[in-house]
Image (cartoon, helix red, strand yellow):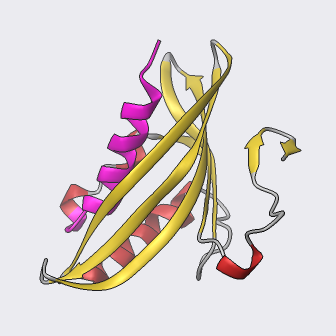
Amino acid sequence: MQDFKLLTRQLLETYLGSDTLGEVAIQDFLDSNASIIGTGKQEFFKNIEHFLNSFKFDVEKRKNIHFEFKDLEIEENIVDDQCVFVYGSVQIYGLYDKEVTIIHLDSRFTIIYGVRDGKWKVLHIHHSIPDKEQLEDEEFPITLGKQV
């Protein structure tokens, strides 16, 4: 069985560590029909090409901003041998010239992995940056079709 905690760490490192367009390998993790939803300027991506174009644009704009993460916490929920949910939280830091912290995101995520063409791929990502005042009694999806 795949190590989903390691796979999620690699996905995060690839996403945050892409400093140049030549290093963009995020599509290696994603199924061509993956859905990606998050808080921020892009709430919902229409398709994978829309996400990749936005991602490449963001990487190009970053230039002197280097991203790091700390306190990665991951839980996994194995549905069956074809589907696994991974959810957790992570602190993301944006460093200007690798020294000055200019971004600090306390974020949470849910990732659904599924087998496609014999490989584990990301089928869905939900990434959120919680509003501290609304955390109490917040619904956060951890299983498909259900919220707790």
Please tell me which residue lies in front, 6 or 59.
6
Majority secondary structure of magenta residues:
helix
Estimate the x, y position of residue 112 in percent, counting from the top left: 63, 38
Residue found at x 47% / y 12%? 1
The residue segment tinted magenta is: 1-21
The single residue placed furthest to the right in the displayed view is: 146
Residue found at x 46% / y 29%? 4
Residue found at x 33% / y 72%? 93
Please tell me which residue lies in front, 94 or 31.
94
Q: Is residue 129 above or below residue 146?
A: below
Please tell me which residue lies in front, 5 or 18.
5
Estimate the x, y position of residue 87 in percent, counting from the top left: 59, 43
Report which quarter residue 98 is drawn in: bottom left
99 is within the stretch colored magenta = no
The single residue placed furthest to the front in the displayed view is: 136
Estimate the x, y position of residue 2 in percent, counting from the top left: 44, 19
Relative to 148, is 108 on the left or the right? left
